[in-house]
Image (cartoon, helix red, strand yellow):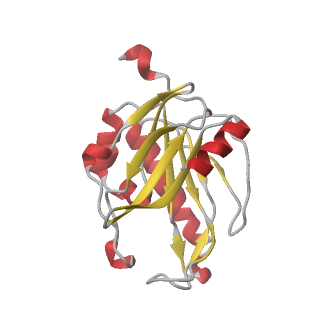
Amino acid sequence: TERIGALARKHKMMICVGMDEKDGERLYDSAILVGADGKLLLKHHKINNLNELMDPPYTNGTPYDICVVETPIGRVGVLICADTFVKDLLKKMAEKSPDLLLMPYGWAADIKEWPKHGKEMEKTVSRAAKAVGCPVVGTDCVGMITRGPWTGKTYGGQSVVADKDGKVLGVLRDRDAEVRVFEIQPMSRRATK
């Protein structure tokens, strides 16, 4: 978290990143949002873990972990990967009225399934944007998994940005690192609440 905070301060930007988090004997699939000042704004523990695919298995977060935080760009929420497969978790996030939702994924498949597998991530991000009612940024890493039950599977990139209606605004490159800037309008729903 300290290194991410230093990067956020250096570049004067918020950063959201997924990571493994050890807390005593518990291992969490976590995502953090760090402010431009380098301070931790939000931490989310993944709730819908696919533990049959993880060794050691992650500890599940709870629906009470779903939250949003006020930022200079509006209310930002974070969910992780398979959390977005559960309608009740998307509904709980929608109840928090985020202006923007950030979702780090671990979207992996056999290499022969790419780039087609990325289309499923597009659909998932689009559905989440519609369900929550705000723009969504769904990110995926790039590279081959070298350990554990998923050894040999590939993260294919193809990160997705969708507007509040689920319209896909952009998809990053297949199986290649890419940085791109998107202009999206956070919802600014505070005035209506």
**Tally of marks:** 0
Q: Based on the displayed image, in which of its 4 quarters is residue 60 positioned?
A: bottom left
Q: Residue at x 36, y 38 (%)?
A: 67
Rendering coords of residue 105 (x, y %): 50, 60
Task: Work out whether residue 166 can be spotted.
Answer: no
Horizontal side of 65 relative to 22 (left or right) equals left
Q: Nearer the viewer, residue 185 or 150?
A: 150
Q: Which residue is drawn at 54% across and 40% down?
A: 34
Q: Quadrant of the C terminus?
A: top left
Q: Which residue is drawn at 56% across and 85% down?
A: 152
Q: Based on the displayed image, in which of its 4 quarters is residue 130 positioned?
A: top left
Furthest residue toward top: 191
Does 26 appear above or below 164?
Answer: below
Does 175 appear above or below 183?
Answer: below
Rendering coords of residue 135 (x, y %): 52, 38
Rendering coords of residue 186 (x, y %): 54, 29
Q: Which residue is drawn at 54% across and 37% down?
A: 39
Rendering coords of residue 16 (x, y %): 55, 46
